Amino acid sequence: MKKRSIIISIILVLLLGLISVSYGAETVPDGIYWIEDGTPYDKFVNNVHGYSLNVDDGMTVDMSYSNICAVLENQHKRIEIYKQPLEQGINRSSYINYSNKFLNNTLDHRKEYESTVTINGHSVYILQWSRDKLSRVQNDKNYYADMEITVGNYVYSIFVKADEPLWQSGGYMYLANSFTAFTPTQSAYTRKAKPTNFEDKGWNNETKIAYNQYFGSDSELKWGIFEPNAPDSFSDLDRIESEIEYEFPIILNYTSFENKIMHPWLKGRLDNAYAHNKILELTLQTPDETWGEGNMIYDVLNGEYDGFLTNYAETVSEFDHPVLFRLCNEMNGDWCPYSSYHTSKDTLLFKEFYRYIYSIFEKAGADNVIWIWNPNGVSFPNFKWNDALMYYPGDEYVDIIGLTAYNTGTYYKDEKWTEFKDLYDSMYWGYLTLFDKPMMITEFSSSSVGGDKNQWVINMFDHIQYYENIKVAVWWDGCDWDSNGNVARPYFIDEFPQLIETFKKYLNVKSDFWDIYA
């Protein structure tokens, strides 16, 4: 009887077209979706988010992050489907308008069609646009359409991109015309990232030793610092280290795309950091975007910065000592020009950008680079299509998971004082379920406006002990300025004598301090 039941179950699975999609060594559980063959379209049913619709025949399905979206793709077309709740001040109009502000960049984006229609009793907003093809993206899909279907307190976003004009690739209205919502029947599945394999990375021996020293499973928490003048000059950092009687082994430094040839100060910074026994957390970012001047992500993926990137990677490779490399951090924040908020809501473009630069480092033989992927703690906008996981480039491209969240204080309206544990608890414990990789707080700090900064730091030291997988924490020693040139957020590590004494006390305790006071 049991054997017969198994056979019947197998037959039902085959009849329904129930499929499990493989992602690395993991398999998406049966039942969270299914595809039914049909003519001229297949029927896709998402049991996690509760909807069905017709899709192109023979598309592959990726439900790796089924709590965020479903991705269907074939050679010519990619479809991403999100279920966005309308809550916490988000209404349909604000969601649509804010999501589409990238169209302000008319140099890179061409709006082709916009309309709101009623389909099967639901309001459907339709937007169609395009951009130029990018020479460094294989089979670039540069023709877009987005349909926002409002059903109750949700907007279902159907995001489509194709490698040819959409009318040539079968259009897209069949997606909305066949869309039906129902009550979800399955829990979400989210894949967990795999750890870095030394042999796969091909690191040199010094880099392997550094990785084990700072990020090995038995490594104790180490501290780093951003001091604005270091490593160009160490005078201020030397003074700080003398005052708190602690030498930071890791320092954070920012670099940008200075030109199309080379970074003028990169070699000197690497050498100077090494001469002072520091490992550099080297960050590379594209400069701020100015509307009307285009977005550099497109330029990079068109090969315009190949010379700069090749020289940059070769300089790092020739340095030959360990480097922590962080590429375009906080990409899920709308203040970053490399966020998909600025590039067609297309998070795949960031992944293409990341992987392309990674390949340039590989060609340069940079076997001394430990790669950090570092989203912001909270996505801005906090929409499903902008979720941090949508920017994750893949396990083989990421060695360390970076965490970033600040207590910004209360200088600006609507800001609130936030304790360290309130910033990091949900992020840390959530990341533990998503990534089997070591973590570091790549930059963090507390303002002194709106609360007791010294007590905040004490609470931070007392609480960070519980985050065993965070191996490095980097204090950001600087400030943010308001539009009038006043200090809005003082993040200084030496802001007042009591604060210096607190850092001096906690940074110099022995490792068994935590066991005594836990």
Image (cartoon, helix red, strand yellow):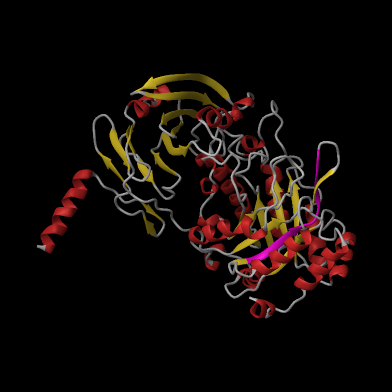
Q: Residue at x 40, y 23 (%)?
A: 168
Where is residue 330 drawn, in percent x and y? 64, 47
* Residue placed most toward the observer, 120 or 224: 120
Q: Examine the image and state in which quarter residue 494 appears.
A: bottom right
Position of 402 with respect to 141 (left or right) is right
Q: Residue at x 61, y 27 (%)?
A: 108
Q: Residue at x 76, y 50 (%)?
A: 450
Q: Residue furthest front?
A: 451
The answer to whether residue 247 of the structure is visible from this angle is no
The quadrant the C terminus occupies is: bottom right
The quadrant the N terminus occupies is: bottom left
Establish if 322 lies above or below 299. Answer: below
Where is residue 155 drawn, in percent x and y? 45, 33
Where is residue 109 drawn, in percent x and y? 59, 26
Type of secondary structure dominating the magenta stretch: strand
The answer to whether residue 19 of the structure is visible from this angle is yes
Q: Examine the image and state in which quarter residue 337 appears.
A: top right
| Magenta segment includes 439 | no
Position of 239 with respect to 71 (left or right) is right
| Residues rendered magenta in the picture | 471-482
* Residue placed most toward the observer, 156 or 515: 515
Q: Residue at x 72, y 39 (%)?
A: 413
| Magenta segment includes 478 | yes
